[in-house]
Amino acid sequence: MDNLTVAEALYEIADLLEFTGEDPFKVRAYRKAAEAVGLLPEQVADLAGAGRLTRVPGIGKAIAAKIAELVETGRIGYLEELRQAVPPGVLDLTRVPGLGARTAMLLYRRLGVDSLEALELAAREGRLRDLPGLGPRKEAAILEAAARVRRRPDRVSIGVAAPIAEAVVRHLRSHPAVLRAEVAGSVRRRQETVADIDVVIATRDPAAVQAHLDRLPPLPRPVDPVLVPPEAFALTLFERTGSAAHLAELAGAAPPAELAGMAPPAAAEYVRPYAAGAADSPHRSAQDSRVTEESEAADAVVYRTLGLPYIPPELREGGGEVAAARAGRLPRLITVADLRGDLHVHTTASDGTATLAEMAEAARALGHRYLAICDHSQSLAIARGLSPERLRQHIAAIRRLDQGEGFRLLAGAEVDILRDGTLDYPDELLAELDVVVASLHSHLGLPEAEQTERLLRAIHNPHVDIIGHPFGRVIGRREPAALDFDRILEACARTGTALEISASPSRLDLPDRHARLAREAGVKLVINTDAHSVRELELLPYGVGQARRGWVEPQDVINAMDLPELLDWLARPKG
DNA sequence: GCCGTTTTCGGCCCGACTGTTTTCAGTCG
C-alpha cells in the first residue's frame, strides 16, 4: 500500500467530516495527517508494521489505528460509515459558490437534495427560502450559481492535467510496441485549464498498445488516445494539437492543395528512438533548449512542408501566429532555462511550510542565482502576516543567511494593498527591502473604477517593484477583480512597475491574453512561483507556459536577468 | 483529532462579508 493511497483516504475522511458537522479542528487534524503521510520519505506501511506511526508529527493514536487498519485490511470502517452518511451528490453541492458543507447537509436532510439538478429544482420551486439560515435572496443566489456551475464545462487546471498526461506517456513508452507517444491538444498548448488529455501514439501493433492502455489505473481525467502508424504520426500530432483556430488560420494562409496533398514523409524521419531523459536534463543552456525544442517536435516537419518556421504549440491559438510566422516575426519565446531565480516565495515566518534556510537551499539546488523572500504583511492575519518588528527581524535573518557564492538571497515582502490603495507597511520600512511585491488579497469584489484606482495607487508607490497575481483570481474558484487593464498597463509602463505571472497552477495570473498586452505595452513581467513549500519552487514551468502563450520573450522578464542586471533594475528610480 | 504541558485540557491561523438575523451563522480565503 503506497503512501498516496493512505493520504487520499485521510483526505476523504476530512472532507466527509466537514459535512457531518464535526469540529473544524478535527477536520484539520485529518488534513494535516494526510499531508504528513504524503510528504513522508519512507513507506507508511513499514511504519505501521513497526508500530512507529505516532512518531510522525500530525499522527496520533486515533489516526495511527486507522492507517494500520487500512494497511492490514485494505479498508477503514470509519471511512465507509462516513460514505454512507454523505452521498456523493451532496459533496457535489459545494461546487456552488456560497454553498458550504453545512448548508449542503441541511438541504440533504430536510429536502433530500442530493445533486445539482435537485438543488436547482428545489430552488426554482421556492423550497429553499424556508430553511433556517436561508431566505429569498440566498435562494436566488444559489439558483443562479448552481446553473452557472452546471453549465461550466468540467475542466481541470493544467497543473493537474499535465502530470497525468506525462505519466500516461511514460507508461506508454515503456511498451515495446509503442514507437512514439506524445501529448497533444490543450495540454501541449499549455492552456490554463483542460477538459481531456489528448495523446498520439505511433505503433504497428494497435491491439497490443490498446491492451497496454487498458491496464492504466483509473485516472481522474479522461484520456483520449489516438493510435496511428508511424508514417502518420507527425501529421496526426499536428492536427490533434490544434487549436481549431490555429488550423483554420493555417488553412487560410496556405494553399489548400499544399495542406491536403502533403505527402506522408518517410517514416524514418519521425521514428527516432528516445534517448532516455535527454529532454529532461536540467543542465541545458537556454540556447540549447530553443534549438532542441524545435528538433524534438515531431510536427516541425509539417511547418517545414508549408514553408513556415516552426510555430511552438503555445502560440497555436489563431491569434495571428501564422501571419507572424510568414512575416518572420514570431517571438523568441521564453523558456524555463532562461529564468535565473524566483522573486516571490514564502517561509514559515508567515504561511509557508519550509524555513528560510530550507527554501534558500532548495532554490540553490534548483540552480537559481537568486531568491527573494516575500512573506505576507501584517493585515493578512490568516497567513500570520509579519508586523513591522517581525519583518525587521526577518530582514536581518535573510541578510545573515545571504553568504553564498553565486547565489543571492534578497529581502522582500508581499505587501497587502489595503482597501484605499495604500500599502500595509510604511514607506520607510519598504525602503529597507530589496524587492516589494504588492498584492490584492481582500475586497476583490470592488467595482471596476474603485478597484482600478486602488491598484493604480499601489503602482505609483515609489517602492513597489512588482504587482503580485494582479487579478487575484483563483481558477475555477474566484473570479478576477474588475480592472481597467489599459490604465494599469499605462501606469506600469510609466512607473517601471512589473506585473507578475504567478506560476501557481491555481492562479496563472496574469492570464495569457493580459501577458501579451503587457508585453506589447512595454511593461516588464516576472514569472514567480509564490511557493509556500520547497516542492512548489518547481512550479515555474507552468508560469513559463502561460508566458509563452502570451508571446513573452526573455527580455520582457525581469527574472530572466542575471543578478547584476536585476539589481540595477531594482535600483531604478520610479517615474 | 493532535499536541504540549506552567500535562490530561484547552488551544489549534482570523477577519471580512453576506444574508439572515435582532445578535448571528455560514462561507470564504
Image (cartoon, coloured by chain):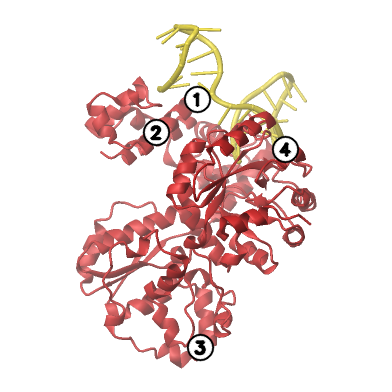
Whether residues under marks 4 and 2 lie with C-beta atoms below 8 angstroms apart, the answer is no
Q: Secondary structure at mark 3?
A: loop
Looking at the rendering, in which quadrant would you find the C terminus of chain A? bottom right
Pointer 2: what residue?
A: A36
Residue A16 vs A455, above or below: the answer is: above
Report which colour depicts chain B.
yellow
Q: Chain of mark 1?
A: A
Query: Which residue does the image show at 58% across and 80% down from the upper left?
Result: A329
Asked if one can make out residue A522 in the rendered structure from this viewpoint, the answer is yes
Whether tag 4 and tag 3 are in contact, CB under 8 A, the answer is: no
Q: Tell which circle, 4 or 3, labels the residue nearer the N-terminal end.
A: 3
Q: Nearer the viewer, mark 1 or mark 4?
A: 4
Q: Amino acid at mark 4?
A: Leu
Question: Disc 1 marks which amino acid?
Answer: Phe
The mark total stands at 4
Q: Earlier in the sequence, mark 2 or mark 1?
A: 1
Rendered residue at 27%/36% (across/down): A43
Marks 2 and 1 on same chain = yes
Above/below status of A314 relative to A133? below
Give the distance between the C-alpha atoms of the residues marked 1 and 4, in whole angstroms: 36 Å
The percent position of residue A97, horizontal first and vertical second, equals: 59, 43
Which corner quadrant of the image does residue A402 belong to? top right
Q: Name the residue beneath numbered marker 3.
A: A254
Looking at the rendered structure, which numbered label has been put on residue A518? none
> Which one is earlier in the sequence, the residue at label 2 or at label 3?
2
Q: Position of residue A195 (x, y in %)?
A: 46, 59
- Disc number lying in front (2 or 3): 2
Question: Alpha-carbon distance for marks 4 and 2?
Answer: 37 Å
Is circle 2 on the same chain as circle 3?
yes
> What distance separates the C-alpha of mark 2 from that of mark 1?
16 Å
